[in-house]
Amino acid sequence: MTQIFDNPADFADEALDGFVAANRNYVARVDGGVVRSTQMPAGQVALVVGGGSGHYPAFAGLVGPGLAAGSACGNMFASPAAGQVYRVAKAANAGGGVLLSYGNYAGDVLHFGQAQLRLNAEGIETRTVTVTDDIASAPIEELEKRRGIAGDLTVFKIAGAAAEAGLNLDDVERLAIKTNYRTRSLGVAFDGCTLPGAKEALFHVPAGQMSLGLGIHGEPGISEHPMPTASELAELLVSKLLADKPEDAGHRVVAIVNGLGTVKYDELFLLYGKVEKLLTEAGLTVVEPECGELVTSLDMSGLSLTLLWLDEELEQYWSAPADTPAFRKGNMAPRAPRTAVTSDDAETSESEQPTPAAAELGRQAVAILAQVRDVVVEHEEELGKLDAIAGDGDHGIGMRRGVDAAAAAGEAATGASVARILTAAGEAWSERAGGTSGALWGSAVIAAGQALGNRVAYSASDARAAVAAFANAITELGRADAGDKTMVDALLPFRDAFLDELDGGAPVDRALAVAAAAAESAAAATAELRPLKGRARPLAEKSLGHPDPGAVSFGLIAARISAFIDSQLATATAARAGNGVQA
């Protein structure tokens, strides 16, 4: 259990600050993560990696010559926000373009994807290679659906070495793709990990059992097995990886035994010796292996085995020197310190004067954001427990972080137009929450604000546009469909009911009440679905019988907003009646 902290909510940021203080010869802090503190040659490709905190030495520990140029660092087990990725990449860029690389998780895909669009729009050529090495998370025919675990290291190392050698963006991307295709990993857990400040681990493995196929964000494995001996464990891991080898596999491999947090080095070395013997018996030659903590999961008791099948080209870059806080190989020439580190991310401000109607609607939006915050706070623990059944248990925490930031940003912008207030709130939500929910809710709130704009007057048609824009932002960015067991399963019934009621002549408050009821009903019905998207997908059977936490939180929020608007209208009606005004 993590015990050293002041405020658990500040754990990730304060740990990153301390990491930078301890490694100033390697890294410099920027808003959103770290970049190299030493100079890079002009025109060199910048490899920017990242993901949630809690995995050290991934990801910040891999920043330095011969490896990454920067790392975007999210909150505990949560993707960095798009703005954080953008700022880190902007600061790391040396003029040769940017390659973003990270584990294939929904939140990371959303946020890094948003950052890539923004960077490309500004003329910084940016590509992406996601890591998909975990054989437990999808069959080999669906390689692109697999998540990234300790195979992050092989992809990052070879891409970073290629960039250091002066290869262009096309070749660095090509080598990263090739490395990812030829990398396979499988992990096991003996017990779960505990988030800072939490009283319980995200999951427990029964005594005498082992969980096979775990994730690195606190997700439990996909099946449980009697605890094996070291020889039996080595045989299990090696045999499953060899059965999944790439079609063009050769006979030279990198083997990585990776500790996830509390398995001692002596145990890792013991297992590695048995793994290497099995690989040799299978006719393979092991090249420059690694054994230790490389991609961890806080205090998780577990480990993973990764194999990378080499060819001459990949072996050259795997063996190349690297010098980072946590990964060193060979000898790198000394580098001069950078003169300045900045992301040059200018703040934007609203230039137009808000209309009275837009300012009034903005004040209502601030009040609604406060209600959304209250309902999330009330149900934070419940949502976290629901998410822990087949996910990483951070949905309640993530929603709380996001809506706290959104409500505060809205209050700070009071007096501006509704468009400006919701844009500020959405940006804050995305930035603070991270993860899938942060990207989706942040983008959707911004889209709704942009649809409402800064108008002289508002009508039901504007409410229609805002709801449609909110829904479109989520469906287009998240690429989930009805039946995938996500927030979309509550969102689409909400949208459809709302629009149908408006089309039938109902006032906005009535349409909202009907839509909120539809969302809550649809959210409950997700208990009968098997997840087809997100981290819960590999644990579909565990998810069955429990509603999706994203759908549940959306239903709760919709119901609270509807109830709040009804109460506001009732208060206004009573006030008018008290003044002798006919309702």
Image (cartoon, rainbow, N blue to C red):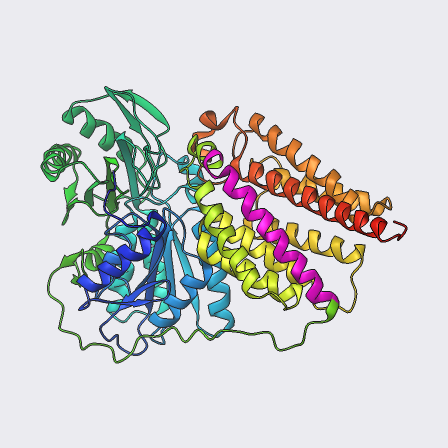
Residue 354 at what x, y percent from top left?
68, 72
Residue at x 12% of width, y 40% of height: 265
Name the image quarter holding residue 87. Answer: bottom left
Q: Is residue 364 magenta?
A: yes
Q: Position of residue 547 (x, y in %)?
A: 55, 30
Question: Is residue 81 positioned above or below 540 on the image?
Answer: below
Q: Residue at x 19, y 43 (%)?
A: 255
**In terms of depth relative to the viewer, which is nearer, 539 or 340?**
340
Taking the image as shown, residue 340 lies to the left or right of residue 274, namely right
The structure residue drawn at horizontal position 53% and vertical position 56%, both measured from the top left corner, is 406
Q: Quadrant of the N terminus?
A: top left
270 left or right, relative to 343: left
The image position of residue 42, as x and y in percent, is 30, 79
Q: Which of 508 and 469 is in front in this view?
A: 508
Q: Looking at the rendering, which quadrant does residue 510 occupy?
A: top right
Task: Residue 539: tell me if it is visible.
Answer: yes
Q: What span is colored magenta in the figure?
A: 357-382
- Quarter residue 282 falls in: top left
Which residue is at 23% across, 57% downward? 61
In the image, is residue 506 part of the stretch drawn in magenta?
Answer: no
> Which is the main secondary structure of the residues drawn in magenta?
helix
In the shown orientation, is residue 567 left or right of residue 142?
A: right
